[in-house]
Every structure is written in C-alpha cells, then in structure tokens.
Image (cartoon, rainbow, N blue to C red):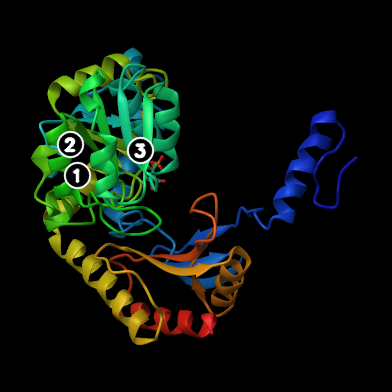
Amino acid sequence: MTTPEGVCTDTAIDRQVLETLGALDAAGRRRDLRRVEADGRCRVRVDGRPAVSFASCDYLGLATDPRLASAAAEAARAEGTSSGSARLLAGHDDALAALEAELAATFGAPAALVFSSGYLANLGVVTALAGRDDLIVSDRLSHASTVDACRLSGATVRVTAHDDTAALRDALADAGSFGRALVLVEGVYSMDGDRAPLDVVADLAAAAGAHVVVDDAHGLGAVGPGGRGAAAAAGVAERVAVQVGNLGKALGSFGGFVLCGETTRELLVQTSRSFVFTCAPPPTSVAAARAALAVLRDEPERVERLQRNGGVVRASLRDAGVDVPDGDTPIVPVPVGEDRRAVAVAARLLERGWFVPAVRPPTVPEGSARLRLTVTALHEEAECRDVAVAIAEALS
Ligand SMILES: Cc1ncc(COP(=O)(O)O)c(C=O)c1O
C-alpha cells in the first residue's frame, strides 16, 4: 500500500516511520528536498521558480568557473571519476599530495591533510586528538559535525554559551587534570555569521595548557586578508593548533581539509577513522580544488568583492529597518523567531524572486528561526541592496 505522498506502508517499519514523520509535520519541522537548479551565476530555479539566490556557500563564485570545470574534466579523462579506494590503500596520488602542499602554502600552515568532506574532517580531528582521559570545551553553536565528533570521542565535554569567554575560562579551570584539553570554536559561525573572539580564546587556552581547534569552513577562502581565514584575520593563526577548512564552499569543489603541524598530520593519517575508512576524494574534486587555489592567489579582487557585498547587504538591511547583528562575514542572519513565520517569510521572498532560506531548529536553537543569507562575489551590488528591501517588505 502507498500513501498519497507515494510512501510505501507495507512493512512494520514503514508504519512506525510514518508516525515519526507525522510528528515532524505536527511540529512544523518537516523539511523539503527542493530542486535547485543553478545557472552558473547566482540565479537559480527553485522547484522551477526563477530566483536570485542568497543560499549558496560558493562564496567566490568558483563552482561554475570554467577553469575549475576544465581542470575537473581533464582529471576525469586522465584518471577517471572515482579514486576507487581509501587514501591508505590505493587512493593517494601526486595530485592529492600537491593539493595538500598548495593548501598549506596558501593558508600559511606547516602541513595540510585532505578529508573526503568537512564533516569527516571534524570527526577525524576531534576523535584523533581527544579520548576518554581528555577534556573538550566546545561552543554551544558548534556545527553538528563537531557535536557528533565530541560524542564519538568519549572525552569529557563541556559546552559553553556562545562566545562566552568567562565560561570558557571556568570550563578550563581544571584542564591540567586531564590528559589533553581542546577548545573547539568556529572561525565564522555557520548560522550566525559572527567570528569567534579568537584572540581571547587563544590566550585562555594557552593559560590553561589547552589547544585551540578552529572549524573555519566558512572563513578559509572568504574572510580576512586574501581569504586566509578567521585565525589570520585575528592575528592568531600561529597560536591555533588545528584549522579545519572546506573545499565545497569558497573553493568551489568538494571535500574538507585540515591545517596543522606535520606531527599532528601524521597522527591523523594513522588514527582518524574518518580518514582511514573512507574513499579518497575523486580526481575531479582534487583538480577543481587546485584550480580554485590558483584563482584565489591570482584574483584577490574576488575576496574583496565578496567582503564588500557582505557589507552592502548588512548596511542595506539596516537602512530598510531590519535589525541584523554586526559582522564582517558573508553570512547574514535575519532573526525571525517563530519557525512557521520564518518559513512563510522565505516563501513570500521566493514568490518575488529571492531565494533566501529559512533556518529552523534543530539547525539553530529553539525560538531562533531566521532567514540566513549567504552573500557571494557574484552578486551585483544592486542585488545586495534590492534583496534587503524585499526582506523588509516580506517581514512587514
Ligand atoms: C561550520 C561547518 N563545519 C563543517 C561543515 C561540513 O562540511 P561538509 O559539507 O564538507 O561536510 C559545514 C557545512 O556544511 C559547516 O558549516
């Protein structure tokens, strides 16, 4: 038997699952897999409806750059479309080694290690560096991959209020009684667009003998001078033990990477289960990422334009009477509060040709549903101004 939605209800598990889905519906928490077709700029069709997108983390507009496409196509022709193996079996090659050397050089780190996604990179770093005898202090707004990593690690985990440095100091007070202590923060918080107070975090960690791990998925390539990330922008890159970056956002490809010292890199290669027990990234992603790093180096104006556009969106929202938090990153949250209202406002915007997603719990804390704009270097300045006016109208 199938329901009108086409869901099969033949088996006992299907009947139970329908109950769970019904509960999500009742709570207004059911999400849709929408069909979003991109046209190569920031114009999309969402379920067939044309719109200007403020929903992509392709911050520098590289995902549709012909140079990345050519590099990927060439790699596919030369090496195939799959790595076919984990890194420690047959999945490592010269191109991956070159990508890691280029990532380390671009972002000024001693070494880099590529993972098959940013999620896997966070899992790998945290579980390799922290175990049962160790302490992790993590910001409440850390990404789900970090939250999952903390659970998997078996370490003592203390979650502090967002950006609360006094709470961080308290949580680290007995750090010396643990084997190792890690402080986990995000360079740029993915749903709030603010930057962690990395200078204070680095000082507090150093005083407690703890090590700072920065997930800078949204900062490396996008924030700070030359897109070198939140730690570089705060002048603390050398005091951060590990930075985790992303190839699927500003760098227009797919995958994750870790910036760290050579010794830490070696530990990750040996012991990170999410590195060891998964397929290496395909040659296409590796080649596209290398092409992206070349563009980042040769066209610094892309990062400048991205950063300028972020400022225009924030200023225009304020001019239109919409309260937005301070910030200098490409992620701009517009607080709405109630889940259903956020969804309704996003639907109204889509009808008017603007794709600005609503973000609801559990992605953000209860009662803090919001619109989340992600600005890119591809947006025209007029689009950055006009979306703000449209948001003000849709909220009224
Ligand atoms: C802060 C943060 N960390 C990690 C990830 C995971 O990266 P990936 O999508 O490459 O798995 C994401 C994104 O989705 C993110 O926003």
- Examine the rendering and report whether any part of residue 134 can be seen: yes
Side (left or right) of 30 relative to 370: right
User: Quick one: 198 or 116, which is closer to the camera?
Assistant: 198
Which amino acid, by three-letter code, is at mark 2? Ala
The crowding category of the residue bearing disc 1, from other C-alpha atoms within 10 Å (few below 14, some 14 to 19, many at least 20), is: many
Which amino acid, by three-letter code, is at mark 3? Gly
Disc 1, SS: helix
Where is residue 200 drawn, in percent x and y? 16, 48
Task: Write down the quadrant of residue 226 in the picture.
Answer: bottom left
Residue at numbered disc 2 = 205
Q: Residue at x 30, y 55 (%)?
A: 62
Q: Residue at x 22, y 52 (%)?
A: 221
As drawn, the label of residue 201 is: 1
User: Quick one: 64 or 312, which is closer to the camera?
Assistant: 312
| Circles 1 and 2: CB atoms closer than 8 Å | yes
As drawn, the label of residue 255 is: 3
Q: Residue at x 55, y 70 (%)?
A: 346
